[in-house]
Amino acid sequence: MDYSRHEHDVLVIGSGGAGLRAAIEASAAGASVGLVCKSLLGKAHTVMAEGGMAAALANVDERDKWETHFADTMRGGQYLNNWRMAEIHAKESPDRVHELEEWGAVFDRTKEGKILQRNFGGHAHPRLAHVGDRTGLEMIRTLQDHGVHRGFDDYQECTITRLLKDGDRVVGAFGYDRENGQLRVFHAGAVILATGGLGRAFKVTSNSWECTGDGHSLGYRAGAELIDMEFIQFHPTGMVWPPSVRGILVTEGVRGEGGALKNSEGRRFMFDDIPPLYTNQTADTPEEGWRYVIGDRDARRPAELLTRDHVARCIVREVKEGRGSPHGGVFLDIAWIKDKVPNGAEHIKRKLPAMYHQFKTLAGIDITEEPMEVGPTTHYAMGGLRVDADSQMTAVPGLFAAGECAAGLHGANRLGGNSLSDLVVFGKRAGEYAAAYVNENGRGTVSEAQIEDAHREAMAPLEREDQSGGAGPYAVQFELQDMMQEKVGIVREEKTLAEAVEDIAALARTAEGIGVMGDRNFNPGWHTALDLRHLLSNSEACARAALARKESRGAHSRIDFPEKDKEWGGFTVVLQQDSEGNMEVRRDPLPPVRGDLQKIIEEQG
């Protein structure tokens, strides 16, 4: 076995918004930082976040404040959120936006020169700071430029297969270069997981190929707890046509700028089903939106900007009842506003340049002239590694997590725009506290026995005779994705969830026997065989958590338990590996919300 060895104080796994912000902060604290990218630096999935980042800047509506943002986040998460994380996020998001501005991010502007903010689903006020519809790209550009000048070592196209431990403490990671299979051992005093989501466990997803839930699985296998894994957000608007681009995200910013969802009858069906929370409304025209009053707030919103879980279920209803578009979705129409604003077509192109280009190039549709066909796509995992709200450290000493692979902030459903501010708020904290941890505890030691074991595990698919019956890694992955879409998708029930758990176990047995041809050079079959372990463990966690939660809440919807259950509203579903390597499921009571924050929730409605 030959491998290269790399020494760092802090190792960051993942180079999206959370990973880059963590690396910047750890480096600023004087730590030696290594940054591992599964893909290329600058190509993280964060670039696909389009609509904006939520922060109570109050540049468009002076009534906005952190308390309102906090209350909206808690309400959107159905009060299963970690309330301390929601408080930190609401308070610190404005500083992180201004920090990005200072580092060179070019935000859209109001007439007065302030950072412009737009409406988004579930937010009481225009709150999303944005750069057209390519905000994530601008965030990555800014963080990457600032981070490179701050200083860290980057390892691109490198996949981590296992975390290394010194007793109970994480002290590094084992991985390989995807291009040539060169093995790498990273020794670090602290490891930060910032690997993003797990959307590739489903057939239809907005997630890029890297999103196989590596961080979720690596942390779980190292002893950390997973929570909220039943809550998978299906973004209501992904591309439906042509099939080659099915699932690619259509930003909520389209609806924020006035896009209307219509069925095959041309009717704005979202006004058929306003949730009870918003029943205090006046009879306004659909173009104006409905008016709702919550606490001291009096606002006007289009029904298309209700929370994502609700909009997705309404779209599924229209399709199932025969009022869908020709290709199994519904219509999203932004063209209608052309006559409402000066130079309407140019206005749409200026506000939504990426969407205009995306549909023009991929679907041959001019969104300034005709509607888009859209439908729900697997988009975001609210579930992930349980972390301490202040430090972002998991229950495993020396192991931190931030961004989508960490859980707690979003509860049962994430509000649009909260993901980008989540990345920088908690990425910063993870980097800060990881550097402090190393400064206090040193780097620990990595045993050769662990390295040899990790090596055997990674090389197994290349070295064994195939015992999968010729299934191969791709066939197993496709079968898993089809099954998850069908049985652990938008609408769930006991029978199919139980079947899913059994199906995953059978696929896992098949995956353990897979042998791939070739060597370590340019071998995507090998990569896929190793990714399968992450996909299967995360799929099992999703299915088991969904089976355990016998109610419908937020992004978790069960037809056999269609209502919210008051008792379940006080529990988090926790998954942890037991001593025999099996997945243990339990439910932990939620801690009571701190008194002053509970008062804010009650005052804000």
Image (cartoon, grey):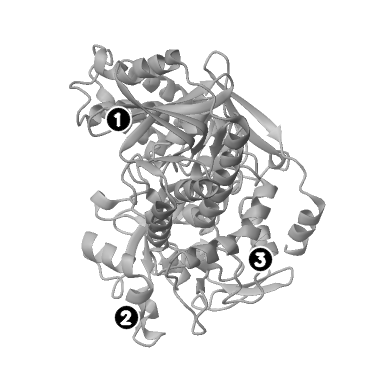
Q: Would you identify the image quadrant in which residue 415 lies?
A: bottom right
Residue 473 x %, y % = 28, 26
Amino acid type at circle 1 is: Thr
Check disc 3: other Cα within 10 Å, few if <14, some if 14-19, many if 20+. few
Residue at the image position 30 percent from the left and 33 percent from the top = 478
Residue 528, numbered label:
1
Residue 378 x %, y % = 42, 46
- Dot 2 or dot 3, earlier in sequence: 3
View extreme (left): residue: 518
The residues tagged by marks 1 and 3 sit, at their Cα atoms, a distance apart of: 49 Å
Q: Would you identify the image quadrant in which residue 452 lies?
A: top left
The answer to whether any part of residue 496 appears in the image is no
Q: Nearer the viewer, mark 2 or mark 3?
A: 2
- Number of marks present in the image shown: 3
Check disc 2: other Cα within 10 Å, few if <14, some if 14-19, many if 20+. some
Residue at the image position 55 percent from the left and 37 percent from the top = 400
Residue 346, numbered label:
2
The answer to whether any part of residue 184 appears in the image is yes
View extreme (right): residue: 595
What is the quadrant of the N terminus in the image? top left
- Dot 1 or dot 2, earlier in sequence: 2
Left or right placement of residue 63 versus residue 249 in this view: right
Q: Are marks 2 and 3 in contact (CB under 8 Å)?
A: no
- Dot 1 or dot 3, earlier in sequence: 3
SS class of the residue under badge 1?
helix
SS class of the residue under badge 2?
helix
Residue 279, numbered label:
3
View extreme (front): residue: 30
Q: Nearer the viewer, residue 531 or 268?
A: 531
Q: Are marks 1 and 2 in contact (CB under 8 Å)?
A: no
